[in-house]
Image (spheres, grey):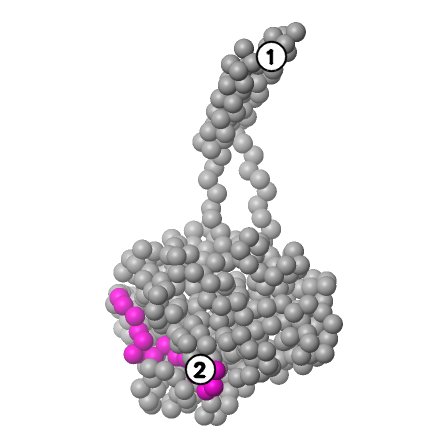
Amino acid sequence: MKMRLKTRLLGMSAGLAFLGSLTMAPGTAHAVVLPDADCGLGPTDNCLQFQDFTVYSLALLNFQATGDPLGPGEPFYVESTPGALGDDLVVATGPEGAVTDNGDVAGNTADDAYGTPNNIAQNPSVNYLMVPSLEPAPTFTGDNAAQDETTVVNPNAPNVPGAELPVTADELPLWDIQIPTLDTFLGDDELVFYFNLNESNKTGLGLDDGQDMLGFMQVWLTDLGLDGAVGGGDDTEISFTLGGLGMGACYPGAPIGATTCADQQAGIDDILPTANDKWAYVHGQLCVSDAGAVLAFGDCNAAGLEGNTVNQNLGANTAAFALYSDELDNAVKSGLWDVMSVDLRMGHIDNGFEQLFIIATEIGEPPPPSVPEPGTLAIFGMGLVGLGWLWRRRRSVRA
């Protein structure tokens, strides 16, 4: 009798578990849930603002949440191995052995991923532009929509692999996607770019001595006009920029030795759209207090400070930064635009490959647990009544 009752109880438990799988609404998979932006360098701040984009360090967010380094199983871990990117939109990645085909996600309505420099010697470093020799397939309506908006301050494009000099204005083809495809991909979530920092693991400070590099991104939205054709004369564009303009030499209130942007150096890294544009300075490490405040950009020992060195140079398999623009996200979802184009530029790459990809992401506090519908509660209650009846019967048998 005891064996029969135990079997019935196990069967009821399995039934309730199966019932739960049927009645609970399936959840949407997210890379992470990013917090609402509170940009600055204090212990409660979680981001920096680079012109139109909010930039989150995933390693810093993870340290503030758990005190642990970023890795598998941590709350802000975003895996970016080739297999993990198969369901994402990949803008740029390694030229070999990585996901480059967006066809499964976007069909023939988005470019495949651009290749980025890989296995670069530490000295000299190289720069990166989306030059014509790197343009990926396929060709579709809206491809190269913002090409006529691109410029390069130095047409000699120093140290850019694949560039056929001079690089003239209106030449960069950029990464393009039709916005209806992007809207379907995003669903109810936000458009967030994720970036890998994959520099050589050196211990020094500086662009070519340590783990740092430079970055710049401009995102264009194009309305193809009444004729629906690229360059038809009635196209209109707007752009959103991630760079160093408007911040001066350092972020306001920056700690000792901090720099978050950099001037272009003539003949070295002067490949931004205009001479007045600045690079966003990408640091491989941060020095952080126990409370999560940024004490310095770089290693704590190198800065002569007591604190915790947080590694942001995480390689190709773990995303380092999340990049978000609320204005861009709203514009994409407005229904007013036809094509989104991404212009990625990088400076002082001394290892690679870096990656840029898009994941539909939730921003803000996680939603509260869903409340079962009345019918679900009634069925679940019936199950509990049944369990109670079995428990009472089991007691009477023991007696």
**Prevailing SS of the magenta stretch:** loop
- Residue 80, image x and y in percent? 45, 61
Q: Which residue is mark 2?
A: 121
Between 214 and 377, the one nearer to me in the picture: 214
* Residue 262 falls inside the magenta stretch: no
Between 300 and 140, the one nearer to me in the picture: 300
Q: Amino acid at mark 2?
A: Ala
Q: Quadrant of the N terminus?
A: top right
- Residue 184, image x and y in percent? 38, 53
User: Residue at point 32% right, 58% down?
Assistant: 106
Would residue 316 appear left or right of 75 to someone viewing this image?
left
- Residue 210, image x and y in percent? 56, 80
- Residue 160, image x and y in percent? 39, 84
Local secondary structure at mark 1: helix
Q: Is residue 39 above or below residue 296?
A: above
Between 330 and 6, the one nearer to me in the picture: 6
